[in-house]
Amino acid sequence: DEILLRTQTSSVQIRTMLKNKPPIAIISPGRVYRPDAVDGTHSPIFHQCEGLVIDKNITFGDLKGTLETFAKRLYGDEVKLRFRPHHFPYTEPSAEVDLQCFKCGGIVHPQVLINCGIDPEEYSGFAFGIGLERIAMMRYNIDDMRLLYENDQRFLAQFR
């Protein structure tokens, strides 16, 4: 009753900003837990990968370019992304990126930088989060996330 499993890997970002001065560029992968019902595209346990960049003159354009480059490298140049305004508490401005089930977003909010001892007048940054299972599902045309956890040799054999 007194234990909360992590819902994000964002704590790695905060610890990094508290311990290090900019420039900062990290990736923080890990297992996360959410109160999601199990179906073909949702699981209460999945793996997330978040990224954080803090440096001078970082803009939303840097985030957009990073995510577009990532998607094109993984899925090909013909992939289309849609950026929609969305509210995330620790990023402003923020966006959801639509690429089927692929989602991420955000520029680090100045107050988060202040709380970590980083001057937002000198530094800015962006952050994003991506579900690793969703990346694999789209990349390999997997229509049911549960297949990734069942250890069925017939399913796994196709990835040798």
Image (tube, helix red, strand yellow):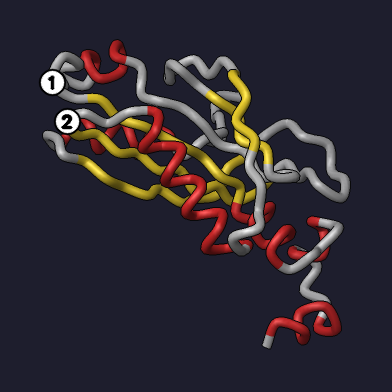
Instruction: Name the residue at 56% across, 15% down.
Output: 87
Taking 133 as reference, is 92 left or right? left
Q: Earlier in the sequence, mark 1 or mark 2?
A: 2
**Residue 96 appears at what percent x and percent y?**
60, 29
Viewport quadrant of the N terminus = top right
Q: Residue furthest top?
A: 111
Quarter residue 43 falls in: top right
Q: CA distance from mark 1 to mark 2?
A: 6 Å
Q: Which residue is mark 2?
A: 56
| SS at mark 1 in the image | loop
Instruction: Name the residue at 46% across, 27% down.
Output: 106
Specify the amino acid type for callout 2.
Answer: Lys
| Rendered position, 115 above or below 137 | above
Q: Residues within 10 Å of mark 1 (few under 14, many from 20)?
A: few
| Residue placed most toward the observer, 28 or 129 | 129
Instruction: Name the residue at 61% across, 47% down.
Output: 131
Q: Are marks 1 and 2 in contact (CB under 8 Å)?
A: yes
| SS at mark 2 in the image | loop
Taking 150 as reference, is 95 left or right? left
Instruction: Name the residue at 40% across, 48% down.
Output: 28
